[in-house]
Image (tube, helix red, strand yellow):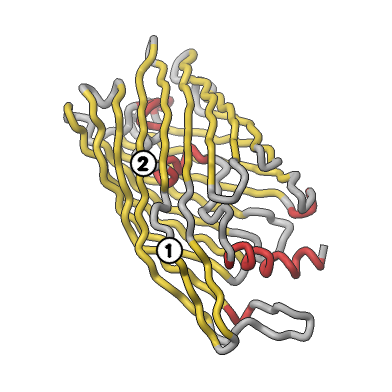
């Protein structure tokens, strides 16, 4: 276990140096961060309750049994002006901060797009993009590469690069108020080389494009209850395609539960509650908790993953 904790930061850095694998932040409750993964996506509360303005925050602690394991925080805001027909405007933005041992990044993005529709509350085809800047950080003084204590460098370094994301999303009311949705996105569309230099030479991270696909269905049952099966596909060059399959049940009232699994040998559990329409209010406040357990090649000893999401949605 001590050897694994010692080697993990270096292994993660080396993965970044020739970075052809997963580079973007991971989410257990990916529906809560759908607009970060796909800028054209609709918020869950828009499809289920018609609320068109959403504010959200999340915190994710990955592999809690490992020192210097990934930690991710996000803030987001989204708005759809559902009163317009033809092309319904949508906009928002988000901040994401990710730290893994001595490496990390912080991105700030704006989001703009439109929904081609006759009535946005019943369905449409959304196209959107995000644009912003990402600061990449390396604490070179913390990277011990050999047992004799040599470090990769003595100075912490940062680089700031532009970033653009693209998204396409289709949703449609089916039957008695049920919703079908699907989307395709590239949240990191610019592939750039990030080179860091120090007195010992240089090392680099190559950003690669990631492609996400999603599909899901809201089947409403009872008063404000629904069942939602969903699938998220993730692809990065030279890495296996990852597939997440999940099922969520919103119990009529205030509680929901969910479960799923991924092809990356992980299982997911989630639960949460909402306050709002069950008390007669249009606004909704939700608290969600997600739990991952990995059975990857590291073994179960790498620890579990915990994720908290807070969401406030309004009808404006």
Q: Is residue 55 left or right of residue 155?
A: left
- Please say if the residues under marks 2 and 1 sit with CB atoms less than 8 Å apart: no
Return the residue nearer the eye: 206 or 176: 206
- In percent of the image, x 81 and y 67: which residue is there? 3
Q: Give how far across and how far down residue 229 sits, in percent.
A: 54, 24
Q: Is residue 195 left or right of residue 259?
A: left
**Residue furthest toward the bottom?**
199
- In percent of the image, x 47 and y 22: which residue is there? 217
Q: Give how far across and how far down residue 309 sits, in percent.
A: 50, 45
Quadrant for residue 54, please give it. Answer: top left
- In percent of the image, x 65 and y 77: which residue is there? 143
Return the residue nearer the eye: 137 or 274: 137
Q: Give how far across and how far down residue 186 sits, in percent.
A: 42, 46
Q: Which residue is mark 2?
A: 167
Q: Which quadrant holds the N terminus?
A: bottom right
Q: Give how far across and how far down residue 101 sits, in percent.
A: 62, 68
From what the image shows, is residue 58 above or below residue 244? below
From what the image shows, is residue 26 above or below residue 287? below
Q: Is residue 51 left or right of residue 273?
A: left
Say which mark, if any, is on residue 42: none
**Residue furthest toward the front?**
238
Q: Earlier in the sequence, mark 2 or mark 1?
A: 2
Return the residue nearer the eye: 206 or 139: 206
Task: Check disc 2: other Cα within 10 Å, few if <14, some if 14-19, many if 20+.
Answer: many
**How far, Cα to Cα, is label 2 from label 1?**
20 Å
Quadrant for residue 118, please give it. Answer: top left
Element type at marker 2? strand
Q: Which residue is mark 1?
A: 192
Element type at marker 1? loop
Quadrant for residue 125, please give it. Answer: top left
């Amino acid at each position: 276990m001590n050897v694994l904790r010692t080697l993990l930061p270096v292994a993660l850095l080396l993965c970044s140096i020739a970075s052809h694998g997963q580079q973007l932040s991971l989410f257990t409750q990916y529906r809560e961060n759908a607009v970060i993964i796909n800028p054209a996506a609709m918020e869950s509360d828009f499809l289920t309750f018609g609320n068109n303005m959403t504010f959200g925050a999340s915190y994710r602690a990955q592999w809690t049994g490992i020192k210097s394991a990934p930690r991710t925080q996000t803030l987001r805001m989204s708005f759809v002006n559902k009163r317009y027909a033809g092309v319904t405007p949508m906009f928002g933005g988000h901040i994401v901060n990710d730290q893994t041992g001595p490496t990390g990044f912080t991105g700030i993005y704006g989001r703009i797009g439109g929904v081609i529709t006759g009535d946005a509350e019943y369905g449409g085809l959304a196209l959107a993009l995000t644009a912003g800047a990402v600061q990449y950080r390396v604490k070179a003084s913390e990277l011990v590469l050999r047992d004799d204590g040599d470090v990769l460098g003595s100075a912490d370094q940062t680089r700031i690069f532009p970033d653009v994301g693209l998204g396409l999303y289709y949703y449609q009311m089916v039957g008695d108020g049920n919703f079908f949705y699907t989307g395709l996105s590239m949240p990191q569309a610019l592939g750039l080389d990030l080179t860091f230099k120090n007195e010992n030479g240089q090392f680099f991270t190559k950003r690669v494009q990631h492609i996400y696909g999603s599909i899901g269905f809201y089947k409403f049952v009872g008063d404000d209850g629904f069942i939602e099966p969903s699938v998220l596909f993730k692809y990065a060059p030279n890495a296996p395609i990852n597939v997440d399959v999940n099922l969520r049940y919103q119990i009529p009232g205030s509680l929901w539960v969910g479960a799923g699994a991924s092809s990356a040998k992980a299982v997911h559990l989630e639960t949460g509650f909402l306050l709002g329409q069950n008390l007669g209010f249009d606004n909704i406040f939700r608290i969600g908790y997600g739990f991952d357990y990995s059975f990857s090649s590291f073994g179960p000893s790498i620890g579990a993953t915990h994720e908290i999401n807070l969401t406030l949605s309004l009808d404006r």
